[in-house]
Amino acid sequence: MAKGFTLIQTVATAGVFSAVSFWYGFMIGRESARKELSELIEDLRRQIPDSSSHPHP
């Protein structure tokens, strides 16, 4: 009896690998987007003058 993967085992292994790859890619992408958004918010805060220092008429 030859040892090897059956078609079902191959498909299952590929599915697990795909799911894990997707999960890690999603988490890395989410973290990257969070950092980019954080930097954008900080840039906007630096551009907008502090409204509490200017009294409103």
Image (cartoon, grey):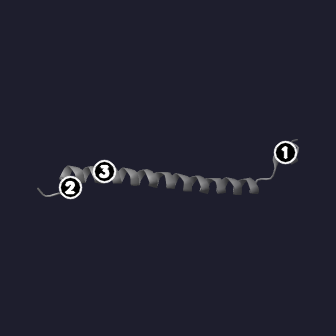
Q: Secondary structure under badge 1?
A: helix
- Residue at 11% x, 56% y: name it: 1
Q: For mark 3, what is the residue?
A: 15
Q: Position of residue 5 (x, y in %)?
A: 20, 55
Measured in 3D between alpha carbons, the distance from the residue under mark 2 to the one under mark 1, in whole angstroms, is: 69 Å
The 10 Å Cα crowd at callout 3, few under 14, some 14 to 19, many 20 or more, is: few
Q: For mark 1, what is the residue?
A: 52
Q: Nearer the viewer, residue 50 or 36?
A: 36
Tell me the number on the disc at residue 5: 2
Tell me the number on the disc at residue 42: none
Name the N-terminal-most of marks 1 and 3: 3
- Circles 3 and 2: CB atoms closer than 8 Å: no
Q: Residue type at mark 2: give it.
A: Phe
The 10 Å Cα crowd at callout 2, few under 14, some 14 to 19, many 20 or more, is: few
In the image: residue 11, left or right of residue 42: left
Q: Position of residue 4 (x, y in %)?
A: 19, 57
Q: Nearer the viewer, residue 22 or 6?
A: 6
The 10 Å Cα crowd at callout 1, few under 14, some 14 to 19, many 20 or more, is: few
- Depth check, mark 3 against mark 2: the one in front is 2
- Residue at 88% x, 44% y: name it: 55
Q: Position of residue 16 (x, y in %)?
A: 33, 50
Name the N-terminal-most of marks 2 and 1: 2
